[in-house]
Image: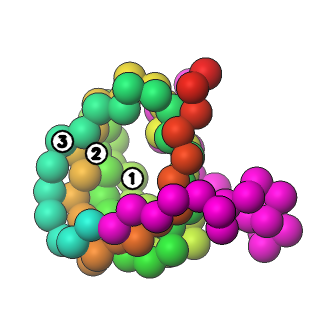
């Protein structure tokens, strides 16, 4: 099973999931390690980041809907400032 899943959602799917009501997180250009203690879904409003995990690199950018698996350890390398909606899943 992939630990990082990148999708494109339609405007209808974005509304159905309630994404516009999710909190927003922003971060400047930077590089840092991160471990997810719960699954996270996020929708990238602006920016680009390269996430390295388990020997793979994933490019995530504006318009991507991403799911990060619980217990994933990775390195975020933000190429241009990120602004995203996010939601943590408890299962």
Cα distance between the residues tagged 3 and 1? 14 Å
> Is the C terminus in the top left, top right, bottom left or bottom right quadrant?
top right
Label drawn at residue 91: none
> Is the N terminus in the top left, top right, bottom left or bottom right quadrant?
top right
10 Å neighbourhood of mark 1: few (<14), some, or many (≥20)?
A: some
Q: Mark 3 or mark 2: name the one nearer the start of the chain.
A: 3
Q: Which residue is mark 2?
A: 52
User: Foreground residue, 67 or 28?
Assistant: 28
Dot 3 lies on which element?
A: strand
Dot 2 lies on which element?
A: strand
Q: Which residue is mark 1?
A: 58
Give yes or no for residue 7 being in the magenta stretch: yes
Cα distance between the residues tagged 2 and 1? 6 Å
Q: Mark 3 or mark 1: name the one nearer the start of the chain.
A: 3
Q: Which residue is mark 3?
A: 33
Tags 2 and 1 in contact by the CB under 8 Å rule?
yes
Tags 3 and 2 in contact by the CB under 8 Å rule?
no
State the extent of the magenta-drawn residues as a range: 1-26
Quadrant for residue 67, please give it: top right
Residue 26 visible in this rendered orientation of the protein: yes
Give yes or no for residue 65 being in the magenta stretch: no
From this view, report whether residue 88 is shown above or below residue 51: above
Q: Residue at x 31, y 51 (%)?
A: 51
Q: Position of residue 66 (x, y in %)?
A: 54, 51
Dot 1 lies on which element?
A: strand
């Amino acid at each position: 099973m992939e630990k990082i899943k990148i999708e494109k959602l339609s405007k209808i799917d974005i509304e159905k999931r309630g994404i516009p009501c999710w909190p927003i997180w922003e971060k400047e250009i930077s590089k840092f390690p991160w471990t997810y203690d719960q699954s996270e879904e996020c929708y990238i409003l602006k920016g680009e980041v390269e996430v390295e995990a388990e020997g793979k690199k994933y490019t995530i950018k504006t318009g991507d809907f991403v799911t990060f698996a619980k217990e994933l350890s990775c390195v975020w390398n933000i190429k241009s400032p990120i602004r995203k909606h996010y939601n943590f899943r408890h299962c």
